Image (tube, helix red, strand yellow):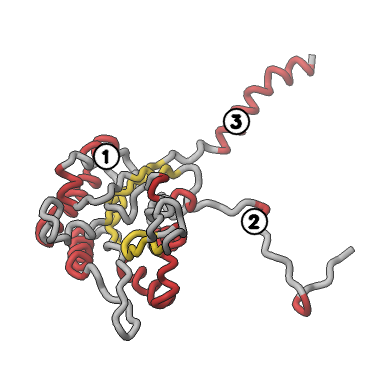
């Protein structure tokens, strides 16, 4: 009799425990829009890597990174090619849009993509206001630096008008800003003239079959460079405590969470 009563009670007990445990966090999407410095790359261009490619590894499974950045796009062409509207249509409350343009907007030698600083500002405002209209979270990112050192070994500013425009729009509309231009320049300065080449697509002839004649590219990143830029972005996600996002950072696995054992005089005796 008692066993039969317990069997009937067991499903209710399970439901009660589940209600206390609470529902798992809702998944959110993080859209990336921008140019080739962020974009996904095909295997034929490896080891070229956009900084958006390693970004998903920094988040837990409740954040889905949707990298919509495209090679060669400016704010103007991203809009003209109807790459933005599908994102607006798909945005859900709580989703994020990280916005980094400037490399192609500033390219006066390419009138098919050039965007004046005034129009650039207006396009950034459009991305921000339309994201907010869908109750999403826009984040403006200044254009990541190109590698350019002067004769004294000082890394130069390479996007000043467009970085200024991005900062201005962020201040005007009270949007979170990640100053990747400044942070990436500081990183390159720390690496120095020669070692900073490791962060970019710098290859000698024969280094990689995709580039049999070598490559001297101071704009696009190597795997290491992309990861370092992604780390800079993530440092600001945490430092600025971006809502819904900063608390969804990937946790280390149990195996890798244990610090390495000390050796020598710093080692502590173990208890048998």
Which residue has dot 3 on it?
Answer: 16
**Residue placed most toward the observer, 1 or 91:** 91
The residue sitting at 56% across, 52% down in the picture is 251
Left or right: where does residue 121 sit relative to residue 260? left
Q: Which image quadrant for residue 51?
A: bottom left
Q: Which image quadrant for residue 237?
A: bottom left
Please tell me which of labels 3 and 2 falls first in the chain: 3
Which residue has dot 2 on it?
Answer: 256
Vertical placement of 245 versus 9: above or below? below
**Residue placed most toward the observer, 176 or 219:** 219
**In this view of the protein, can residue 236 be seen by the observer?**
no
Q: Nearer the viewer, mark 3 or mark 2?
A: 2
Give the numbered dot on residue 87.
1
Whole-angstrom CA distance, mark 1 to mark 3, is 39 Å
Q: Which image quadrant for residue 182?
A: bottom left
Where's residue 123, x and y in %? 15, 52
Q: Is disc 1 surrounded by few (<14), some (14 to 19) or many (20+) residues within 10 Å? A: some
The residue sitting at 34% across, 44% down in the picture is 95
Q: Are marks 3 and 2 in contact (CB under 8 Å)?
A: no
Element assignment for label 1: helix
In this view, the residue farthest toward the right is: 272
Q: Nearer the viewer, mark 1 or mark 3?
A: 1
Please tell me which of labels 2 and 1 falls first in the chain: 1
Q: Is disc 2 surrounded by few (<14), some (14 to 19) or many (20+) residues within 10 Å? A: few
Vertical placement of 149 versus 248: above or below? below
Vertical placement of 147 versus 130: above or below? below
**Residue placed most toward the observer, 3 or 70:** 70
Where's residue 94, x and y in %? 34, 44
Where's residue 135, x and y in %? 27, 44
Left or right: where does residue 251 sit relative to residue 220? right
Left or right: where does residue 126 sit relative to residue 269? left
The quarter of the picture where the N terminus appears is top right
């Amino acid at each position: 009799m008692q066993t039969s009563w317990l069997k009937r009670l067991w499903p209710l007990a399970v439901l009660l425990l589940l209600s206390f445990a609470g529902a798992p966090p809702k998944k959110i999407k993080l859209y990336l829009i921008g140019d080739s410095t962020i974009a996904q790359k095909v295997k034929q261009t490896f080891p070229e890597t956009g900084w958006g490619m390693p970004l998903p590894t920094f988040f837990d499974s409740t954040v889905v990174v949707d990298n919509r950045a495209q090679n060669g796009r400016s704010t103007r062409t991203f809009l003209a090619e109807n790459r933005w509207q599908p994102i607006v249509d798909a945005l859900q409350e709580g989703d994020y849009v990280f916005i980094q343009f400037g490399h192609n907007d500033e390219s006066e030698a390419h009138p098919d993509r050039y965007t004046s600083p005034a129009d650039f500002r207006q396009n950034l405002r459009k991305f921000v206001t339309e994201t907010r209209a869908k109750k999403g979270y826009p984040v403006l990112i200044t254009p990541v630096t190109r590698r350019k050192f002067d004769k004294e070994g000082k890394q130069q500013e390479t996007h000043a008008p467009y970085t200024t425009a991005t900062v201005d729009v962020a201040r005007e509309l009270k949007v979170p800003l990640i100053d990747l231009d400044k942070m990436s320049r500081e990183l390159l300065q720390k690496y120095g003239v020669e070692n900073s080449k490791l962060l970019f697509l710098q290859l000698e002839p024969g280094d990689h079959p995709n580039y049999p004649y070598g490559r001297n590219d101071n704009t696009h990143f190597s795997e290491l460079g992309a990861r370092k830029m992604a780390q800079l972005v993530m440092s600001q996600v945490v430092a600025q405590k971006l809502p819904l996002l900063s608390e969804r950072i990937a946790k280390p696995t149990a195996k890798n969470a244990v610090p390495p054992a000390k050796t020598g005089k710093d080692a502590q005796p173990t208890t048998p």
